[in-house]
Amino acid sequence: MWSEIWFLASKTLIATFRKRSALLIYFGLPIIGILGSILLYGQQGQTQLRVGVVNDDQGQQIAADTIGFVQRLDHVQIINVTASELKEQLAASKLDSGLIIDSGYSESVLNGNPGHISIESVKGAQVTAYMKSMLHGYIDNVAAMAKISGGDQAKFRKLYDTYHSSDFKLTSQSVNDTSVTKAMSFQSIGFLLLFMMNSATGLSELILKNRENRTYYRILSSPINARTYVLANVLVNIIVMIAQIIVALFFMRVVFNLDPGISMGEMLIILTLFALVSVSVSLVIVAFSKNSAMAGALQNLIVTPTCLLAGCFFPRSIMPEMLRRISDFMPQSWALQSIDKLQSGEAMGNIWFHLTILFAFAVVFFLIATYKFGRNNDTRNFV
């Protein structure tokens, strides 16, 4: 039987990849998915925050020192502008935000009640939160000194000068930020799961296409039985899935230099388990389809929506709680959760439950497909 299975599998592989378009579909699309992830996350990272400053409190030391404090913040670029220029450049997105210091600002700080200062932006809190939090801390410190001095200018000046000339030193050390790279690789795997499921369904549909063009019946007229035929198709699926995984991981790690934060061996184990799930799901789709058109419709109805809900296109963390609960019933979600836990530092042995769930999905779907094939009442049973 095994020689017959291998004979059918090899013939199917040769017939499938005789067309160059098959190489693009099965191996090109995962690479395109990796490129899409790089383009999606490639612009993220540390960027310079362009801040326009309007200082109407000229000649005041506190106002000048406040601007100097903002200028010393990491990834902040100060540009002195007028009020009209600020509005124009904010509207044209030439500036990310604006710091407006009105006349009387320094006096209000000395009185212990800071005011006459504001931050403007058309991009919202995502660009103003960092500067606002740092600026509030600085102004509150200066205002606290003013309250402590009780209106005594000499005492305030002594506290203020001591604050600015503090002799303590902060030592900082830069480390590589791997979050963007991990996000790229995680998103690439999400796309890969989608392509794996689509590829598995496409290969399993060959059973229906061969039945439609009568090839299936001609094969059964030989000593080869239906069970051997289906097992050969499963073998083809597994071979293509593993090849697809290896090619995708090679391009991700070697060609595009994306470090997922976990070893390639661990990634291969998880994706191979998911490959079994993909094959089993594709067999269920074929088992419940009367023709290839119906199988294509079921594929569109099942694969893409479940990948969407499972977090293959965007993180589950941004989804409502109800949708996250629904995604727990989808194998793609368990594969992605396994990778996420490994990226967070978990050991492979600590995700045994996730791997068991993936294997259980594969077993259940294989059993459903086997049962349906066995109950098929067409002219010829598949199994």
Image (cartoon, grey):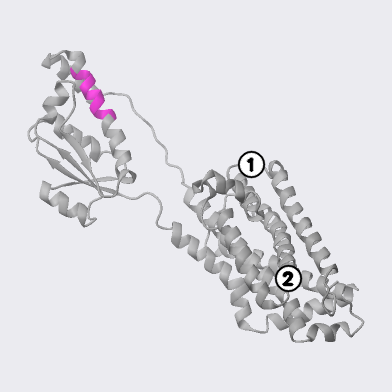
Within 10 Å of the Cα at label 2, are there few (<14), some (14-19), or many (20+) other Cα atoms?
many
Where residue 41 appears, x then y in whole percent?
45, 56
Q: Position of residue 220 (x, y in %)?
A: 87, 82
Magenta stretch contains residue 4? no
Compared to residue 211, the image places residue 39 above or below, namely above
Query: Is residue 264 shown left or right of residue 103?
Result: right
Please name the residue shown 13% across and 30% down the image. 105
Q: Which marked residue is nearer to the observer: mark 2 or mark 1? A: 2
Give, as a single range, the part of the protein colored magenta: 137-146
- What residue is drawn where x is 69% and y is 67%? 241
Quadrant in which the C terminus appears = bottom right
Task: Point out residue 309 in the picture as x, y percentages from the top left corner.
Answer: 57, 55
Is residue 248 visible in the rendered structure shown here?
no
* Front position in the image: 159 or 84: 84
Q: Secondary structure at mark 2?
A: helix
Kind of residue at badge 1: Glu
Q: Residue at x 83, y 63 (%)?
A: 371
Number of marks drawn? 2
Q: Which mark is residue 346?
A: 1
Picture quadrant where residue 63 is located = top left
Rendered image quadrant of residue 211: bottom right
Residue type at mark 2 is Val
Q: Residue furthest left?
A: 59
The residue beneath circle 2 is: 286
